[in-house]
Image (spheres, rainbow, N blue to C red):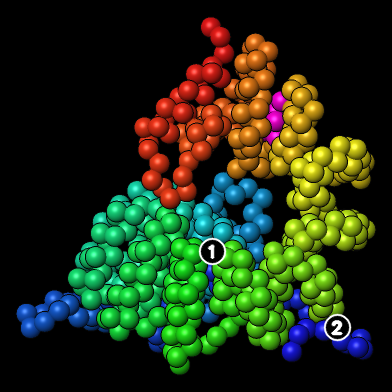
Amino acid sequence: MLLRLPTTATSKAPLFRHRQHGRLSSPFFHSLSFPSGFSSSTRLELVTTSSGPTSVAIICALRSNSRSHVTANYEKRPKASWLAVYKRLSSMPDPENGAASVLDQYEDEGKKLPKFVLIRVIKQLRKFSRYKLALEVYEWLENRRFLITTREIAIKLDLISKVDGISSAENYYLKLSNSLKDGRVYGALLNAYANVSEKEKAEALFDKMREQGLIKYALPCNVMMTLYMKLKEYDKVEEIASEMMEKNVPLDIYSYNIWLSSLGYQGSVEKMEQAFEQMKLDTSINLGWAIFSTMATIYIKAGQLEKAESCLREIERRIQGQRRLPYHFLISLYGSVGKKEEVHRIWNVYKSSFLNIPSMTYRGVISSLVRSGDIEGAENIYDEWLSINSAFDPRVGNILLGWYVSNGFTEKTEVFFNQIIATGGQPNSWTWGILADHHMRARRIPEALSCLKDAVSDTKSKYWRPRPETVSCILQHCEQENDGASKELLFEVLKEAGCLTDAKYMSICSGNELEEDNNSDDEETNEGAESIFNQLLPAA
């Protein structure tokens, strides 16, 4: 049954939170509490026997009476709640003081910080990408001589890779004794390699895990398949999936999703459908909405819109409870199919289902309506967003501004931009980049360069780079008009944006379009980059 607006008003459910399903590394890193009944004085010692592998002995240290008295007093302290600790850490006035200053203050206040509280705090910090703070809490916990499990070692390794880089994570791993390097720790390092696309190191570690019989579950396979997807080595994704089936390693929903995606990216819709039929026979798999979203995307790319719409109807049938994410995909995919009526229908159902609608969702529906050709509808929703949002998000307006520029609506472009400024909106780097393209179309080079300078000066948009087409057009003008001043300003913009050290980007700017199959000649790439670099160098 398709989603329809309710005929009568009903009370709205409170906002909910959903998990980010795309994060394949998360199952490595769930904390474990030490069994109840063991105090911090209890420790595990690894004991090697002549008859077999290392075993674990539980050693209980004897305490003096005075020490027992101190411990008893500590146990009587009130326990701090994890949420209170998390909030105090998150709102530190000076993060440079580190987590230790906050945790020490808790102890000074006479409050107890059990390990399970700190592990819960770390989990929450990681959820919101506060990796440095999470690592500092771990280090504080270790300094208090709490027992650390291999699962927690894996989490620390993951945090080190994110905070200090892959080399530091490797050094931490190498210092661990072999007895502590179990599947979780191997998995954490594998995931760290995959995150930075260290293909050779990831493959070598994956082979080592094979040799030690640690590939018993889907997660390490999913990490490798995700890495190959990122590197566009789709045939290797299929090899991993085949190996899993040969060795009876159960595929999970993520395994199937990645496998189907790889087949779709290779343009093999028929093979994708065969894999889907095999998936339906797997009784351990629940066919949720996400798999149909993947298939719809592939069908749209292949131009098979009827099959795509059939998948979208399956998504609607599978929406359960207060979950926003399926609606976001439906709105986006119906926009890609060009069904503006369906975009409006899903949007109205979404608005009736949730009390609060974030700017991100407005951005998504405006983008979908623009892609489906309903500019008037997109403008109306933008006006609605302006009327109810107190905080201006330039990303919402950038969608319409970009459409006006790319379609030559000069007057609308200027009116719209002036409206942003008049309402107190703060343009971001992408706003200035769009406006630079607007000036380029009218051959107003100084104004275009001024916009690029404003774009690169915005510290909030550190990943912004000017469009290669814009750079190429400005450079062409500078050569034709012998405009050294504009060339020098362009050089400074590219330098500040970090473009000059990116050989691929610079090569595209020089007109050497690179193949997407990663078979481009590095020497040709570097020559193209050096060519445009030399053109940009200011005259001595």
Of all residues, the one furthest to the left in this rendering is: 50
Residue 428 seen in this snapshot: yes
Image position of 302 with respect to 161: above or below: below
Magenta-span inclusion, residue 364 = no
Which residue does the image show at 40% across and 32% down from the upper left?
524
The residue that mark 2 highlights is: 5
Q: Residue at x 57, y 65 (%)?
A: 302
Where is residue 30 shown, x and y percent of the image? 46, 74
Label 2: which secondary element: loop
Out of 266 and 222, give the one closest to the viewer.
266
Q: Disc 1 residue type?
A: Arg
Q: Nearer the viewer, residue 9 or 31?
A: 9
Q: Position of residue 187 (x, y in %)?
A: 35, 67
- Residue 118 visible in the shown view: no
Magenta segment = 449-456
Say whether residue 519 is left or right of residue 328.
left
Q: Earlier in the sequence, mark 2 or mark 1?
A: 2
Q: Main secondary structure of the magenta part?
A: helix
Q: Quadrant of the N terminus?
A: bottom right
Quarter of image, res 527: top left
Residue beneath label 1, please? 126
User: For this view, does 140 lie left or right of residue 1?
Assistant: left
Residue 69: x %, y % from top left? 43, 77
Residue 179 in picture, x, y percent from top left: 22, 70
Q: Residues within 10 Å of mark 1 (few under 14, many from 20)?
A: some
Depth check, mark 2 against mark 1: the one in front is 2
Residue, x 32% and y 81% (percent of image)?
245
Type of the residue with mark 2: Leu
